[in-house]
Each structure stands twice: as structure tokens, then as C-alpha cells.
Amino acid sequence: GQQVMQIPQYQHVQEGEDFTTYCNSSTTLSNIQWYKQRPGGHPVFLIQLVKSGEVKKQKRLTFQFGEAKKNSSLHITATQTTDVGTYFCAGPHRDDKIIFGKGTRLHILP
Amino acid sequence: SAVISQKPSRDICQRGTSLTIQCQVDSQVTMMFWYRQQPGQSLTLIATANQGSEATYESGFVIDKFPISRPNLTFSTLTVSNMSPEDSSIYLCSVERGIVGYNEQFFGPGTRLTVL
């Protein structure tokens, strides 16, 4: 079946360093979504990418969708303590139901 | 955006009992989704709750274990039946909202279930 894989599973960075998480799908995706879940919270939608090669920015966050629409990345520049959490990518499965990747847990060292 | 509430927020239950989780949305939606998230894990879709028809279950989840109701377009319940410690998890409901081709999911705050 369709799978959405994310790496790394965990990432510890010093505050101020950059962070990147990668998402790969076994099949071509019509779109990809990114969510952030703070510790003890629920997933919150960040962005959706639809076009091949699309790049979108939200302040220090840069999202990219691969040309083949099978991979995506989220890059955070100059991390801050507020960036702590788990970042999930998600892509539509059959019947447009969303499949979530396993997530990348980001921990910021002060 | 969508405002979603869930009840209860958390519960501790005994093995063999059942718990019904309620999900209320602030406006009408066609589909509501129920997810399970075990500690430190990703979200796994349990089923899609459709108003006016039976829920659609994902592989590995069955109606006898997770009966779902969807009496109207703003409300749904998920029951976790005959619970065992393996059912300890966070259960989240979500809705999809947006324009065609751009749908984002909004999640409720979740119900943290511990089964002893």
C-alpha cells in the first residue's frame, strides 16, 4: 500500500541552527500537507503544496514539493525554542483520505 | 478555520469496559474523521464518519470494536468497546475544510485514554 516516510525520526539542534525534515512517498501525490504538533497538543495545519517543484515560505519555514511530486521537505532557518514539536507530512491516499508520515520530533537545545 | 471540541479530554478506564468519545464541530461538515495516536507515534486513521450512512473503516479497524455514530452534520461519536490496555492512546477527531483542491484538516484537542 501507499506509504509516506519521514526522516529523521528525531532531531536535536542548538537554538539558532537550521533544521530540515524530509518526506518521501511511494507513489505520486496530488498534494502534500505539513502539520506541527506541539508536545501535549494536537496537530495544526501549516501548509499544503500542490504544484510540482513548488516552494512556499512562512517566515523562517520553507516548504518544498519535489518535481516528481513524491517528496517534500520542510526547512526551518535559525530555530527558536517555539519551534519545538513534531512535524508531520501527510498525503492523500485512496478516496483522498490523508496518510500521515511518522513525523520528525524536533528538540531545541538552549 | 474550524472549532472542534471533544469530550472527555481524558479518561482512565478498566479493562473490558467501553468509552464513548464525543466530537462537536462549530459548523456543518460532510465528513468527520477519527484518528488514533499512540504515545510518540503518528496518526492512524480509524474511520470516516459520514452523515446518513455507515462509517467507512480503515484496514485493521472494525465496527464492533469502534462503533461510530454521526447523527447530524456537526456531531459524531466514537466508542472504544471492550477495552484492553492496548487501546490506551489519544483519539482525535478531525474535519476537512477548504476550497476545492486546497483542503486542510482541523483536529480536535484529542481524548487521552488510559486503560488499566
Image (cartoon, rainbow, N blue to C red):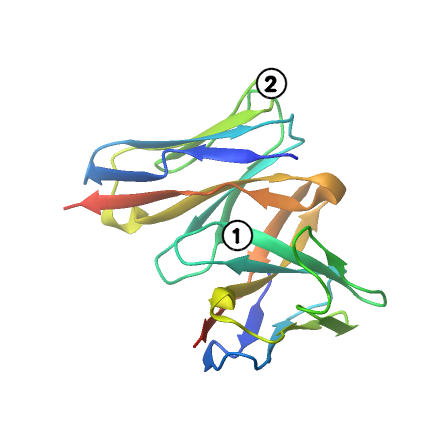
From the viewer's perspective, tell me whether residue A41 is left or right of residue B3. Answer: left
Q: Nearer the viewer, mark 1 or mark 2?
A: 1
Residue B80 drawn above or below residue A98: below
Q: Residues within 10 Å of mark 1 (few under 14, many from 20)?
A: many
Quadrant of the image occupied by residue B4: bottom right
Q: Which one is in front, A108 or B92? A: B92
The residue indicated by pointer 1 is: B43
Quadrant placement of the N terminus of chain A: top right
Of B113 and A41, nearer the camera is B113
Mark carried by residue A33? none
**SS of the residue at dot 1?**
strand
In this picture, is B47 found above or below B88? above
Going by the numbered disc 1, the residue's amino acid type is Leu
- Asked if disc 1 and disc 2 are in contact, CB closer than 8 Å, the reply is no
Instruction: Please report, as a chain letter, where disc 1 is located.
Output: B
x then y, percent, for residue B2: 60, 62
User: Does residue A52 appear left or right of residue B116 in this picture?
Assistant: right
Q: Residue at x 28, y 38 (%)?
A: A11
**Can you give x and y, in whole percent of width and height, for residue B116 in the image?**
43, 77
- The amino acid marked with disc number 2 is Ala
Q: Which residue is mark 2?
A: A68
| Residue farthest along the top direction in this orientation | A67
Q: What is the quadrant of residue B18 in the picture?
A: bottom right
- Please say if B89 is above or below B72: above
Chain letter of the residue carrying label 2: A
The quarter holding residue A26 reads top right
Q: Residues within 10 Å of mark 2 (few under 14, many from 20)?
A: few
Label 2: element kind:
loop
Q: Nearer the viewer, residue A54 or B44?
A: B44
